[in-house]
């Protein structure tokens, strides 16, 4: 599949942006709430629920200053028809991206501030997406500060190693995330 020059430039920009890990900011919770309210009000027929996940959802945890949002949608077709045009017109970057580096694909948006810095990652998926398992990871980190601290140190180390390679940074965290997610699922099943 041939990619247009515009899309390739957008991809290149997204994957080469600096990885910064900053101390926890209590404003992340409000940033989530504000964006969730906007999305629910603007697309009430398409969106079913919205969860704050990722490191910015874990009190006290250092993170990239980007609020991750997991949005349950009715259908991908509906998102492409109704959500994508609106959010792109408001300046959001849109990607049709694979789940955990393989199909199925889903709608992913990057929201930026006026300076062009990322503020939100919005993952729009159906209820059956494996991305919902990330909530187990989030909840386990919240309940286990010792594990959250290990994750924080890993992220800091990887941000130094892969400062301008977001793909490598993300892939290098995968084994830790998968391991803890499996542990959290077993713990939750008790």
Image: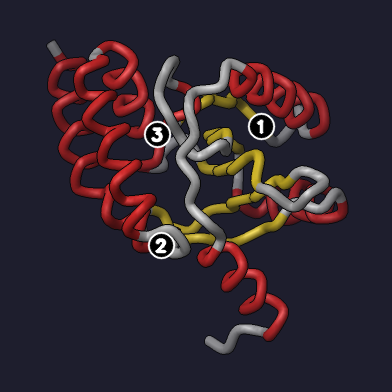
> Is residue 102 visible to us here?
no
How far apart, in angstroms, are the residues tagged by discs 1 and 3?
15 Å
Q: First in sequence: mark 2 or mark 3? A: 3
Give the image location of residue 95, x and y in percent. Answer: 61, 61
> Which of disc 1 and disc 2 is earlier in sequence?
1
- Badge 2: few (under 14), some or many (20 or more) residues near its Cα, within 10 Å? few
Q: Which residue lies furthest to the bottom in this view?
A: 2
Q: In percent of the image, x 43 and y 64: which residue is there? A: 165
Q: Residue at x 80, y 25 (%)?
A: 41
**Residue occupying image coordinates x 80% and y 55%:** 88
Q: Where is residue 43 in the image (x, y as percent from the top left)?
A: 77, 34
Q: Identify the residue under disc 3.
A: 132
157 to 179, vertically: above or below: below
What secondary structure is found at the residue carrying circle 3? helix
- Name the mark on residue 47: 1
Give the CA distance from mark 2 to mark 3: 21 Å
Choose mark 1 or mark 3, whichever is in front: 3
Mark 1 or mark 3: which comes first in sequence? Answer: 1
- As measured in the structure, the alpha-carbon distance from the residue carrying label 2 to the one carrying label 1 is 28 Å
How many residues crowd mark 3 within 10 Å: few (<14), some (14–19), many (20+)?
some
- Give the vertical position of 127 relative to 94 (above or below): above
- Residue reaching furthest to the right: 89
Q: In this view, does 189 lie to the left or right of 16?
A: left
Q: Quadrant of the C terminus?
A: top left
Percent x, y of residue 167: 41, 62
Residue 119 appears left or right of 83: left
Residue at which label 2 appears: 167
- Residue at point 72%, 79% (across, down): 6
Q: In what element is the residue under mark 2?
A: helix
| Crowding near the residue tagged with mark 1, few <14, some 14–19, many ≥20 C-alpha atoms within 10 Å | many
Q: Is residue 125 visible?
A: yes
């Amino acid at each position: 599949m041939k990619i247009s020059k515009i899309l390739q430039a957008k991809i290149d920009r997204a994957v080469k942006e600096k990885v910064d890990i900053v101390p926890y900011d209590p404003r992340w919770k409000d940033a989530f709430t504000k964006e969730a309210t906007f999305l629910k009000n603007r697309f009430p027929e398409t969106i079913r629920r919205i969860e704050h996940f990722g490191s910015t959802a874990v009190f006290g945890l250092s993170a990239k200053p980007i609020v991750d949002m997991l949005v349950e949608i009715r259908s991908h077709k509906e998102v492409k028809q109704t959500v994508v045009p609106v959010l792109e017109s408001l300046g959001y970057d849109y990607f049709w991206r694979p789940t955990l580096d393989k199909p199925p694909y889903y709608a992913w948006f990057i929201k930026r501030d006026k300076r062009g810095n990322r503020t939100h990652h919005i993952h729009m998926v159906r209820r059956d997406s494996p991305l919902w398992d990330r909530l187990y990871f989030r909840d386990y980190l919240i309940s286990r500060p010792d594990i959250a601290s290990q994750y924080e140190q890993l992220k800091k180390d990887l941000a130094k190693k892969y400062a301008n390679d977001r793909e490598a940074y993300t892939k290098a965290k995968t084994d830790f995330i998968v391991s803890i997610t499996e542990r959290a699922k077993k713990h939750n099943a008790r």
